[in-house]
Image: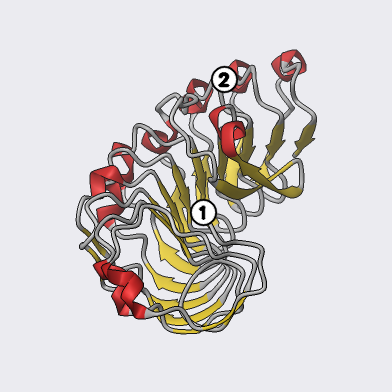
């Protein structure tokens, strides 16, 4: 750990040959190649692919540009990929050596385009998927229904379309015991963007599909999300009424359905949601 110092200059590429699990050089004044919150510029260096023991990759909050690396297949141990808040462009096209090990994928707040790739559905242990604030379009691929371990998904502020299919929200979104003590994720809840880190992630679950072009009705199966804490479907083109199955969301704290084309009365069952602090229709 060498974070929060006054280091400057570049980082030698020889680090790529070291068998490191975690390298934290964040919050310095580095101008070279790694890691978060360092004002780094240019493309993601290719030598990162050679770090065969790396488990935690965090290049977030920099000024990196260009396409995503075509492959991260040298490391069979990689679990966490954080590339958010950069200027990365192009499609989401990456090859992972052992995709079943990936627990977190955060590509939010970039300029990525194209469709959500089907291969993400092969990340069988994925807990956290954050693709918000990009230029993604098209429908959510049906392969994402395989993500049975998912507890947090943010696809907001894109150009996604189609129905919010029942399969996407038919599994329970239950809390997980596995977490990394240095892990942190940004997620908007109760109308505030908050940073969740460490053990707090064991207890937080959420879905944010807001600010897209989704159509159709809200599926009844949404009532299966009994442990979800935050649900945001606002700023879409959803129609119909609020399903009465919302009464099953007994642990929900933030529910936003505003700026849609919903009609009818608010189900009286919602008054029984005692943890609900923010509700917007």
Element on which disc 1 rests: loop
| 79 is higher (above) or lower (below) than 70 | above
Q: Say whether residue 208 is left or right of residue 67.
A: right
Q: Which residue is found at the position 64% from the left and 20% from the top? A: 251
Q: Nearer the viewer, mark 2 or mark 1?
A: 1
| 65 is higher (above) or lower (below) than 134 | below
| Residue carrying label 2 | 245
Q: Position of residue 33 (x, y in %)?
A: 46, 78
| Residue carrying label 1 | 155
Q: Which residue is found at the position 45% from the left and 72% from the top? A: 112
Q: Position of residue 18 (x, y in %)?
A: 30, 64
Q: Quadrant of residue 75?
A: bottom left
Element on which disc 2 rests: helix
Q: Which residue is found at the position 77% from the left and 16% from the top? A: 271
Q: Say whether residue 216 is left or right of residue 13.
A: right
Q: Quadrant of residue 5?
A: bottom right
Q: Residues within 10 Å of mark 2 (few under 14, many from 20)?
A: some
Q: Position of residue 174 (x, y in %)?
A: 47, 24
| 4 is higher (above) or lower (below) than 120 | below
Q: Which residue is found at the position 76% from the left and 16% from the top? A: 274
Q: Position of residue 2 (x, y in %)?
A: 56, 61
| 56 is higher (above) or lower (below) than 232 | below
Q: Nearer the viewer, residue 235 or 215?
A: 235
- Which one is earlier in the sequence, the residue at label 2 or at label 1? 1
Marking on residue 46: none
Which quadrant holds the C terminus?
top right
Q: Residues within 10 Å of mark 1 (few under 14, many from 20)?
A: many
Q: Are marks 2 and 1 in contact (CB under 8 Å)?
A: no
Gap in Å between the C-alphas at discs 2 and 1? 23 Å
């Amino acid at each position: 750990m060498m974070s929060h110092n006054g280091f400057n200059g570049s980082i030698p590429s020889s680090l790529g040959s070291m068998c490191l699990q975690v390298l934290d050089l964040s919050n310095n004044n580095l101008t070279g190649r790694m890691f978060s919150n360092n004002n780094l510029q240019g493309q993601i260096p290719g030598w990162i692919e050679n770090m065969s023991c790396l488990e935690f990759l965090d290049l977030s909050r920099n000024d990196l540009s260009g396409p995503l690396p075509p492959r991260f297949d040298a490391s069979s141990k990689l679990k966490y990929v954080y590339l958010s808040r950069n200027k990365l462009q192009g499609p989401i096209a990456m090859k992972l050596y052992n995709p079943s090990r990936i627990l977190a994928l955060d590509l939010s707040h970039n300029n990525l385009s194209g469709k959500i790739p089907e291969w993400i559905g092969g990340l069988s242990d994925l807990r956290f998927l954050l693709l918000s604030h990009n230029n993604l379009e098209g429908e959510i691929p049906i392969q994402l229904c395989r993500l049975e371990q998912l507890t947090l998904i943010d696809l907001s502020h894109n150009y996604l379309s189609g129905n919010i299919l029942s399969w996407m929200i038919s599994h329970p979104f239950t809390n997980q015991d596995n977490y990394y003590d240095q892990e942190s994720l940004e997620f908007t809840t109760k109308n505030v963007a908050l940073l969740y880190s460490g053990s707090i992630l064991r207890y937080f679950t959420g879905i944010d599909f807001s600010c897209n072009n989704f159509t159709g009705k809200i599926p009844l199966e949404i009532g299966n999300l009994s442990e979800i804490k935050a649900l945001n479907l606002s700023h879409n083109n959803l129609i119909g009424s609020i399903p009465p199955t919302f009464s099953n969301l007994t642990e929900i704290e933030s529910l936003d359905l505003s700026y849609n084309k919903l009609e009818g009365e608010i189900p009286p069952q919602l008054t029984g949601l005692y943890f609900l602090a923010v509700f917007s229709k």
